Image: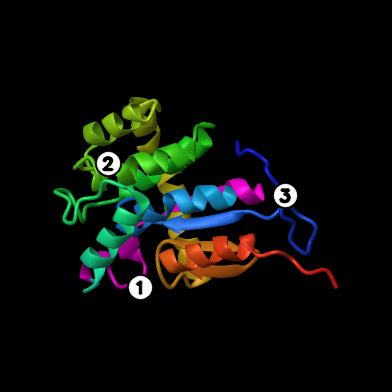
Amino acid sequence: MFARQTEPSVDPSGDVARIDYYFSPMSGDAYLGHATLMALAQERAMPVRFLPVDETRLDLLPEHQRPDRIAEQARRARRAGLRMAAEPLNWPTDPRLACRAILAAGLLGLDQAAASLACLRGVWAEQRNIADPGDLAEAFDAAGLPGCRLIAAAGSEDLRDAAQAVIGSAQAAGIPLLPCCAVAGRLVPGLDGLDRLRQHQHQPSHAA
């Protein structure tokens, strides 16, 4: 799953820690932060539980209404060397199909990280409409995933229930901003929070 470059992180209960990652599959911030998330997970040998959510169901400021969005995302994209449109052709869009397809990837034992990035890159770099089943299937196919199989699975009642459960979990957790990591009961919201979380992991620990 991930290369183990360190010993697995362990929470106080003795269990291996994981990252619960709440994000919208059409989010520019999630696209920009994907590499940081995956690097953090690999460096700390922490599994990621991908929790895609329809951001319109949460009490958040929509990304497209942030006055500083275009300038800030452009700056980050240049720094990361990512191709990123300022105003994608199909954004904002309905993220529900993509949410269910990413969850389906997990249930089918497929790579959820690749499925998530396929959606994000599709919106921001490839001008795809991830609300369209054909377009989304092509995005998955291009990422080496079985697009038609994921779209078919995403239409099931079980996946609709799973997507609703993620929304309920995000609401219960009080997610203040997307993307948002939950690690050992602590919420780390936003791109800046993801950066700080990784920087914190790089700091040397001091034994008592």
Q: Distance between the residues labelled 2 and 1?
A: 26 Å
Residue labelled with disc 3: 8
Dot 2 lies on which element? helix
The CA distance from mark 3 to mark 2 is: 32 Å
Q: Where is residue 198 in the image (x, y as percent from the top left)?
A: 56, 60
Q: What stretch is highlighted in magenta?
A: 42-65
How far apart marks 1 and 3 lie (CA) works out to 34 Å
In this view of the protein, can residue 53 be seen by the observer?
no
Q: How many numbered badges does the structure rendering display?
A: 3
Disc 1 marks which amino acid? Asp
What residue sits 31% from the left and 43% below the top? 121
Q: What element carries label 3?
A: loop
N-terminal label among 1 and 3: 3
In the picture provided, is 78 more to the left or to the right than 187? left
Residue type marked 2: Gly
Where does label 1 land, which residue? 59
Colouring: rainbow
Circle 3: residue type = Pro
Using residue 88 as the reference point, say whether residue 11 is left or right of it: right
Q: How crowded is mark 2: few (under 14 residues within 10 Å), some or many (20 or more)?
A: many
Residue 194 falls inside the magenta stretch:
no
Q: Where residue 129 sits: x, y (%)? A: 20, 42
Q: Where is residue 132 in the image (x, y as percent from the top left)?
A: 21, 39
Q: Is residue 6 above or below residue 110?
A: below
* Quadrant holding the C terminus: bottom right
Res. 117 image quadrant: top left
State whether residue 105 appears in this view: yes
Residue 122 badge: 2
Q: What element carries label 1?
A: loop
Report the residue that reaches farthest toward the left.
89
